[in-house]
Amino acid sequence: MKEIEELDLPGDIYYTKDHEWARKEGETVKIGISDYAQDQMGDIVFVELPETGSVFMKGEEFGTLESVKAVSEVYAPLSGEVIAVNSELENSPELLNEEPYSNWIIEMRPSDENQYDELLNRDDYLEMIRG
Amino acid sequence: MSGSSDLKRTPLHDWHVSRHATMAAFGGYHMPLWYETGVKHEHCSVIAAAGIFDTSHMAVLTVSGKDSFLLLQHCFSRDLERCIGRQPGPLANGRSVYGLFLLEDGTVLDDAIVSQCGQEHYMIVVNSGMGAKVSAHLREQARPEVTVNDHTDQIGKIDLQGPSSVPVLASLLKNPEDILRDMVYFSFKGALFPAASGSVYLQDGTPVIVSRTGYTGEFGFELYVSVSDTLSLWQQLLAAGEAYQISGCGLAARDSLRTGAMLPLSHQDIGNWLFAATPWSFVLPWHEKQRGFSKSFIGAEAVLSGRESSYTYGFAGYDPRKIPVEDDTVVLSETGKKIGRVLTCTTDMAIGRIGERIISLATPEADGRPVDFQARGLSCGFIKVDKPCRSGENVQLSAGRRTITVEIREDIRPDRTARRSIEQVRKQTEEGRR
């Protein structure tokens, strides 16, 4: 397992307390899991993705990640509609371990931009992990 | 990790931590689940190359004295007069046998490998944390001329598993040809109690017990050394195994490998319930016609009376998705009726389905493995149900919002190597390297 100092935590994205990340790209947002999350889970062997067009409320489960250790839910950092899913993960779930930030899971169109303010920045997230 | 200070540590503990292994409590020890390479890599290394596991948490007992044989006949589920070979003959010096210690009510105290070191001297390996309980159980059976000793804290144990184990081990042993020649499955050489009586040494003079056993379903060895020699042996194995892509492996890979090989985990797949219909009835001393036992022993009557109707089966799913094994996890029949509970559910990452068949990374191309086969893994494990099921029948495993469909199986991962001869795996390794 990585030491906290070894974690890769980019400063230009948002984080959640459930270890998702959200990267704002104009009017849409890409969502994935943090380096800390993938390191804790161990090898991810299966990814269950939602249908494009599904609508999720902030905090709602949108998919599951199957690691060797457990089944983990992933939650929507913001409310909105899924406009794309990264179907490459269906055949290569290990991409989430290898490159957790370039390999997003879903892309959403947020219904309430104000919700960005409720997410954690890098420093808040790091502080939370340190406990 | 919180609370790790209360846990026991193996002689390799600091090595695991220094390599950033993901650690967890298991059987009272602070043990590695996997290293930075990840469990899929570790699992597949044992199928295709070799892996080493720290199994120093296992408890090692010796039973010696004039009545040792009688004590074990009374307590162990195998008939030591009839347990070796096709027309079973007696356990002999240098041979081992797997079985159970049952209690009077037919429940399982623990599983064990019993090895005969001499006419009145046996080594018994049981699960971590079980040394004191099994010792006490054996001592309670009051045989005056028997001594039971627990050597757990003096012994380090490393499992070297996988088809490339032979050249790795051979490069470390003094006189490897003599040691490995004719070494059949479930036999061992060497001694540690005392080491002076042993005949197997590493090239640096370290005494070692080399046993052709393991708990992965794959070809390999279990190696026993003193606690102070354990780290050196581990490092020597890693160095010698580098050319063969050897991996350090944690308990997660051990769990997925043993499950795919249809081997039970004590206190999870067998335990404090009646040992009834299971895939492991071979551990009982059946007469040829499977109607009664060839000896009497503790628990025999309860097992034969079969008062509790429960059936344990192996299963494999259709993709890698598992079900969490929790209190509310149930097994449902095809009509949706609750018929039992899940004992183990993990993912064997070396296998996948092609049509009706399960194919392994180790399945030969000539036997149907496509050249471009990519193992995506299948969930697998054991269930305990209250009605008999057919092999090939589908049942559902359900927990909370998740339900998965799995198939009842007599076997899970095909083309395992555990029983191959040393010559067969040596040939295979050499061909693979060309």
Image (cartoon, rainbow, N blue to C red):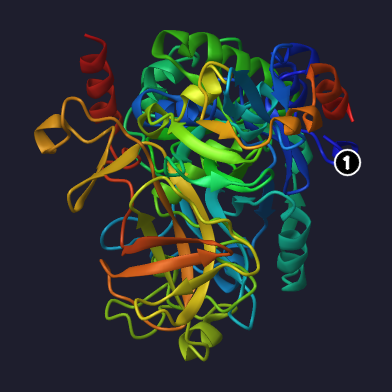
Res A71 seen here: no
Res B272 seen here: yes
Q: Horizontal and vertical percent for residue B217?
A: 40, 43
In this rendering, the count of numbered labels is: 1
For the view shown, which residue lies furthest in the left direction?
B366
Q: What amino acid is found at the position of numbered circle 1 in the picture? A: Gly
Residue at the spot 22% in from the left edge and 36% down from the top edge: B363
Residue at the spot 58% in from the left edge and 28% down from the top edge: A32
Quadrant where the C terminus of chain B sits is top left
Task: Say above or below: B267 vs B354.
Answer: below
Which of the pair B410/B92 is nearer the observer? Answer: B410
Task: Say above or below: B88 vs A65.
Answer: below
Task: Say above or below: B194 vs B63.
Answer: above
Which of the pair B92/A40 is nearer the observer? Answer: A40
Q: Which structural element holds mark 1? A: loop
For disc 1, the chain is B
**Which residue is under mark 1?**
B3
Q: Horizontal and vertical percent for residue B11?
A: 75, 27
Q: Horizontal and vertical percent for residue B256?
A: 48, 43
Task: Say above or below: A106 vs B72.
Answer: above
Quadrant where the N terminus of chain B sits is top right
Q: Horizontal and vertical percent for residue A83?
A: 46, 33
Instruction: Using a 10 Å C-alpha cutoff, classify the residue at mark 1 as few (fewer than 14 neighbours), some (14 to 19) or many (20 or more).
Output: few
Q: Which quarter of the picture shows residue B225?
A: top right
Q: Along the horizontal axis of the image, is B220 left or right of B344?
A: left
Q: Along the horizontal axis of the image, is A39 left or right of B308?
A: right
Which of the pair A18/B54 is nearer the observer? Answer: A18
